[in-house]
Image (tube, coloured by chain):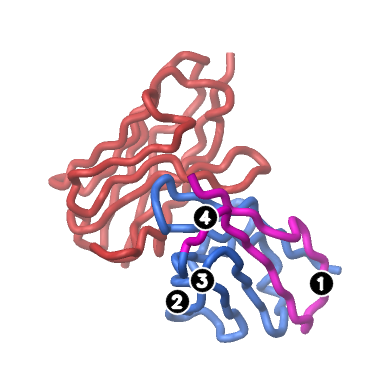
Amino acid sequence: DIQMTQSPSTLSASVGDRVTITCRASQSISSWLAWYQQKPGKAPKFLIYKASSLESGVPSRFSGSGSGTEFTLTISSLQPDDFATYYCQQYRSYPLSFGGGTKVEIK
Amino acid sequence: EVQLLESGGGLVQPGGSLRLSCAASGFTFSSYGMSWVRQAPGKGLEWVSAFSDSGSSTYYADSVKGRFTISRDNSKNTLYLQMNSLRAEDTAVYYCAKRYCTGGDCSFFDYWGQGTQVTVSS
């Protein structure tokens, strides 16, 4: 089974900051990685697939990169609506698996 | 507009059973793979089970294998999760989620339901 590890678990930042979240896979998953945003009490929102492809309607300040075992989600200029928890998910093989999440909070 | 609406959650004693439902609309339900994902209180997302596009394959997390059964009724556009031998650690919000595309390497989720709470406690 593929284990996904995110870091940091919590990140404190200010509006306008550039923010980077890391996701590591326990074995190569090529580019089969998705990113989601979740706000308290809400379902996750899909952001990025195939490591770097932005879903339609997602602001361009979000970007993803990486392949193999190491991936990053970058928010180029943090906006008030971006304070949330972010999860990566591998879909290289079943069982599917998520990272533990990164909470982006206000500094 | 794609909509997924879960129901069937509630309070159940350890060892008990529940059946969750997810009513889908706004897309050709029979063409898409579907999954259940859960989130324990204050914890992260955990994938639970999936049904393939073709409907011929099912997949389970080790934590629920042998206790949970995923099924679907394409005539009713509904996904189910039968949960037996429930444990305290199964307490979570359960989401159903739609696979992004049909076929290919796309077992990620573009639409999610609002979730249904399952609480296992005596």
Badge 2 amino acid: Glu
Chain whose colour in the figure is red: B
From this view, report whether residue A46 is shown above or below residue A19. above
Q: Give me the chain letter of mark 4.
A: A
**Residue at horizontal 36%, vertical 34%?**
B20
Q: Nearer the viewer, mark 3 or mark 4?
A: 3
Label annotation for residue A13: 1
Provide the residue designation for mark 2. Answer: A55
Q: Give me the chain letter of mark 3.
A: A
| Secondary structure type for disc 4 | loop
Label annotation for residue B83: none
* Residue nearer the viewer, A4 or B78: A4
Mark closer to the chain start, 1 or 3: 1
CB-based contact (under 8 Å), mark 3 and mark 4? no
Provide the residue designation for mark 3. Answer: A47
Which stretch appears magenta?
A1-29
Q: Colour of chain A?
A: blue
Q: Tell me which corner region of the image, top left, top right, bottom left or bottom right, holds residue A24.
A: bottom right
Mark closer to the chain start, 2 or 4: 4
Q: CA distance from mark 3 to mark 4?
A: 13 Å
Tell me whether marks 3 and 2 sit on the same chain: yes
Badge 4 amino acid: Ala
